[in-house]
Amino acid sequence: MITLYHCVSARSLRPLWLLEELGLPYQLQMLPFPPRALAREFLQHNPLGTVPLLVDGAARLSESAAICQYLAARHSPGGLDVAVDDAAFASYLNWLHMSDATLTFPQTLLLRYRYFEAPERRQPQVAADYQRWFLARLRAVEAGLQGQDFLCAGRFTAADVAVGYALLLAQHLGLADQFGPAVAAYWKRLQARPAFQRALRIQHEAAQAQGVPTTPAPDLRP
């Protein structure tokens, strides 16, 4: 049985959404945010104290994009992954890893220095700079979606889940009104997916059942 450790609307939503897309059985262990401070026992499972953590037998993964790649390849060959001999394989890997390293990273700094730090430690200029950084990098997604509904291989893949989370985080930050037309239409398509809607509902139901706050708290890794 796969176990996913998750905080509401953190980066661990990527694997939760993908698990729902794949229809795999799993256990969802909800944690308060940030778990490294509010669930110290979790450090026994992940010394970093961050989510996600996915346990699948002997496999243990803590990077959300890597988990998407792992689940798609191991549990959905020919489905939500892209084979190594497919012409779209390089594009698939690039989008998967761009989703976190290029798109989510600047948003976490925006969050930290605009909202999460104590008032005297907030840095409005830093937050504004990283907001511009994110929106500038998002132009690559706008260009990549020209003439197609999804990012690569002519179909929905795990890369769309990974990039889709960055768009959800941007929406939480009030940046969705600055999406280009292709990204805005793409984000609507992703939100309409039943698996995405189930993942949002399931995380809140699980949080309530496990006594964890349900306020979205995107993941920070300072």
Image (cartoon, helix red, strand yellow):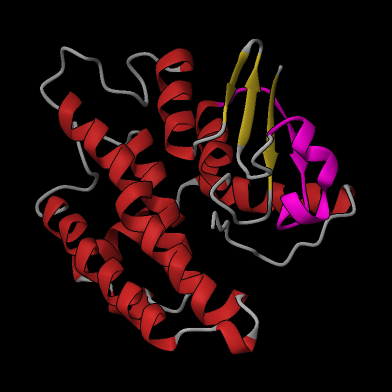
Give the answer, above or below, for where 219 lies relative to 157.
below
Asked whether 123 or 209 is in front, the reply is 123
Q: Which residue: 40% across, 27% down?
A: 69
Asked if the stretch drawn in magenta spans residue 110, the answer is: no
Give the answer, above or below, for where 106 lies relative to 86.
below
Q: Which residue: 51% across, 72% down?
A: 111
Q: Which residue: 69% across, 35% down?
A: 47
Q: Which residues are magenta?
A: 23-46
Asked whether 43 or 15 is in front, the reply is 43
Give the answer, above or below, for where 178 lies relative to 89.
below
Q: Is residue 162 left or right of residue 15?
A: left
The image quadrant that residue 15 belongs to is: top right
Tell me where residue 212 appears, x and y as whole percent. Answer: 84, 55
Q: Quadrant of the C terminus?
A: bottom right
Tell me where residue 172 appears, x and y as whole percent. Answer: 51, 71
The image quadrant that residue 34 belongs to is: bottom right
Q: Is residue 174 left or right of residue 128?
A: right
Q: Is residue 107 visible?
A: yes
Tell me where residue 6 appears, x and y as whole percent. Answer: 68, 44
Q: Which residue: 62% across, 28% down?
A: 54
Give the answer, above or below, for where 213 lies relative to 14.
below
